[in-house]
Image (tube, grey):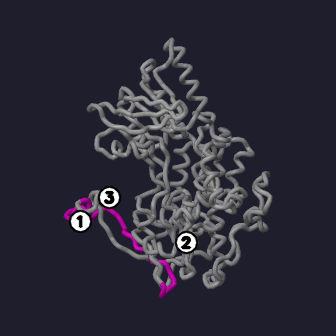
Amino acid sequence: MSTAPPTRPAAEPAPTADRPLDLAGVGIGPFNLSLAALAHGVPALRTACYEQRPAFHWHPGLLIDGATIQVPFLADLVTLADPTSPWSFLHYLKAHERLFPFYIAERFHIERAEYDAYCRWVSEQLPGLHFGHRVDAVRWDHEHQLFEIDYTRLGPAADPHTPDPTATDPTATDQESRTPGRAYARNLVLGVGTEPYVPEPLRPLADAPNVPVLHSSDYLEHRERLLATGHVTVIGSGQSGAEVFLDLLRNRPLGAEGLHWLARTPAFAPMEYSKLGLEQFSPDYTRYFHTLPEPVRDQLLPRQWQLYKGIAHETIDAIHQELYRRAQHADGWPGAVLTPGVTVRTAGRIAAARLELHLEHIQQGTRARHTTEAVVLATGYRERPVDTLLAALDPYIRRDASERPRVDADHRLVLDPMIKGSVYVQNAERHTHGVGTPDLGLAAWRSAVILNSLLAEPAYRLPSRTAFTTFGLQPSGRCGTVIGSPHLPDQRGPLARTRT
């Protein structure tokens, strides 16, 4: 008997107003892929996801050899909600005849490249995933009580005489054909992901052509050129910055490392990885955080930076070991400088191959000029804006005191009651749900919460308690063994009747 999941069937016609989707996903990253995988096990729901990229790829520029994800392999797309799912990481290993080697290896944290391959394996077989489909706009159809989703299907041009779309649209791919389409859905889930963040002082250099200032998300594409560059500066104290610095350090000449690592944080600090500390990435803490007043949440998040911006202990150890090894063999300090507590005030070019950064030390209050030949910005990511995509819905979105969308406990935008459908968000609610929002370990749980909230009867039984820590003196939403209450009765009825 084959253990492989079913192969993806032929594409269905676009959902119409007469036969809409129950849930349409915009974007196919790990979070919406998790949602699609769990939805596949719920016959009552008709779902589909749309993604403008031609295939699944997860941070391809940072798949550095040997780099691991920072959560255990159990934090795959489905296991923490449904360990029996055919889309689990263990099922992936079995399908590729690597289950026993993985067992013998005793690896709790897998390499990023393997996680990327696992997700791609799911994406290539799971029904209802539409790659090469760019969602352009979303509207609410008051007549049909549905969301209208306008998309453009992207693909290679069949006719070699087709005009080059890049002539009018610089974001288009060469020889790309475009076919407009429309789909209808009762509910939406936005999983458009994040985009690289470049600090304001460095944007002019990063945007200029042929200037060696790049974000770490593009590191592997430029790695060989960086290794051949005389002096490289890495900016950013998180895991990505540490991995880039370590990879460059290991592969540059002994005694001529030519590296400088700058960080705004007061130290190159380890990530909080104590067991009780990790309970802040549990559903219990997520529910607790959501109940806090908005000003308290806003004050709390910056103070929790070591929960998600720190560096893995193993990476810190590897960096120190490499520096010590080089100090021994070079009979002196290696040519690598590590300076925390520094901000970049301004930056510019001073020669064809030289860059100058104006630095300020936060604690000392001193300033200095730093010259280098290339800069790698490991400065993190920001939520991808969806203002254009949701422009037609903007008047219906309820916002907080800081003009951010309000998000309820089930990860649903708070909308005007005129909108009967729901718009869910994935990895866009850190201001309401806390530090666990972008964490892969909560992906399956959040997906199950969203799916349960759409159904009259929950599809996934979720735990009422997930942490030994009791957060707060007041209950924070523990209400039995199911999280995710049914939504509006007029929306719930049809799904209840089709459930098998």
Cα separation, mark 3 vs mark 2, equals 32 Å
User: Which of the two labelled residues, at mark 3 and mark 1, occupies the earlier sequence position?
Assistant: 1
Residue 296's x, y, as percent? 65, 56
Question: Which residue is depicted at the point 44% across and 57% down?
Answer: 55
Residue at disc 1, secondary structure? loop
Q: Circle 2 is placed at which residue position?
A: 398
Say above or below: 69 vs 225.
below
Question: Which residue is depicted at the point 54% across and 44% down?
Answer: 112
Looking at the rendered image, the disc whose residue lies closer to the viewer, 3 or 2, is 2
Looking at the rendered image, the disc whose residue lies closer to the viewer, 1 or 2, is 2
**Crowding near the residue tagged with mark 3, few <14, some 14–19, many ≥20 C-alpha atoms within 10 Å:** few
Q: Amino acid at mark 2?
A: Arg
Q: Amino acid at mark 3?
A: Thr
Residue range in magenta is 142-166
Q: Circle 3 is placed at which residue position?
A: 171
User: Which of the two labelled residues, at mark 1 and mark 2, occupies the earlier sequence position?
Assistant: 1
**Crowding near the residue tagged with mark 1, few <14, some 14–19, many ≥20 C-alpha atoms within 10 Å:** few
In terms of depth relative to the viewer, which is nearer, 350 or 100? 350
Question: Which residue is depicted at the point 71% across and 59% down?
Answer: 288
